[in-house]
Image (tube, grey):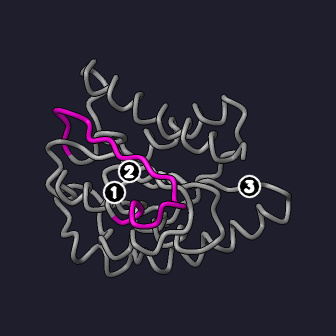
Amino acid sequence: MCASCVTKRKIADQVAALGYYVVVPDLFHGDPYRDGVSFEEWIKTHSPADATEKVRQLIAALKKKGKAVGFGGYCWGAKVAVELAKTDELVAVVISHPSLVTVDDTKEIKCPIEVLGGEYDTVSPPQLVHQFEDAPEQNEAIDHFVKIFPGVPHGFACRYNSSDPFAVQTAEEARELMVSWISKHLKH
């Protein structure tokens, strides 16, 4: 299992320990993106649109069991999260160091959104993340929050050096913000 997958599973376990029902589907089918692999080639067989349809089925099953659903998406998963946020299927969404998300995507969201970005993120630099913030502001009914974490690159919330105290602290703060955001909206 890749290092970021292990970290995401750890995050899921931490959130579940707080009393939440957490589901982490393998949307990569055992083939996550790895450094050194051409992203353009990898994305051809890992479509966020296909993953979104699979997650919709999972959300429907959870809703049948009476569950309200919030969604946290990291990097590629942020695109899946935003696509789902364009529907009425989610209570709230959090995207951390997003990739593939466009400003136009964020104009269509229908649920509260939190965006967590990194100061040194070259995939979704702070200027772009702030444009994501502007779209929900045009619709005052959409609660939103944006934070740019200082001194961190893309992947800071799940692909970090666990022996670096600053990186660990930043990732933990991102997790706490995600849990707080979704919890706030699940209670409404």
User: Which callout, 3 or 1, points at the residue further toward the start of the chain?
Assistant: 3
Describe residue 134's horizontal placement relative to residue 11 as left or right.
Answer: left
Classed neighbour count for the residue bearing mark 1: other residues with Cα under 10 Å, few (<14), some (14–19), many (≥20):
many
Q: Does residue 147 show up magenta in the picture?
A: yes
Q: Which mark is residue 107?
A: none
User: In the image, what residue occupies the spot 28% across and 40% down?
Assistant: 156
Q: Amino acid at mark 3?
A: Ala
Helix, strand or loop under label 3: loop
User: Which callout, 3 or 2, points at the residue further toward the start of the chain?
Assistant: 3
Q: Does residue 132 show up magenta in the picture?
A: no
Q: Which mark is residue 115?
A: 2
Residue 26, position in %: x, y? 54, 60
Residue 49 in the image: above or below residue 68: below
Q: Amino acid at mark 1?
A: Glu
Which residue is tagged 1? 133
User: In the image, what residue occupies the spot 38% across and 60% down?
Assistant: 32
Using the image as rendered, state which of residue 140 and residue 111 is in the foreground.
Answer: 140
Q: Where does the magenta region start and end?
A: 135-153
How far apart in space, not on screen, are marks 1 and 2 (Cα)?
A: 8 Å
Using the image as rendered, state which of residue 72 and residue 141 is in the foreground.
Answer: 141
Question: Which corner quadrant of the image does residue 63 belong to?
Answer: bottom right
3 and 2 marks in contact (CB < 8 Å): no
Helix, strand or loop under label 2: strand
Q: Amino acid at mark 2?
A: Val
User: In the image, what residue occupies the spot 38% across and 74% down?
Assistant: 105
1 and 2 marks in contact (CB < 8 Å): yes
Residue 52, position in %: x, y? 53, 74
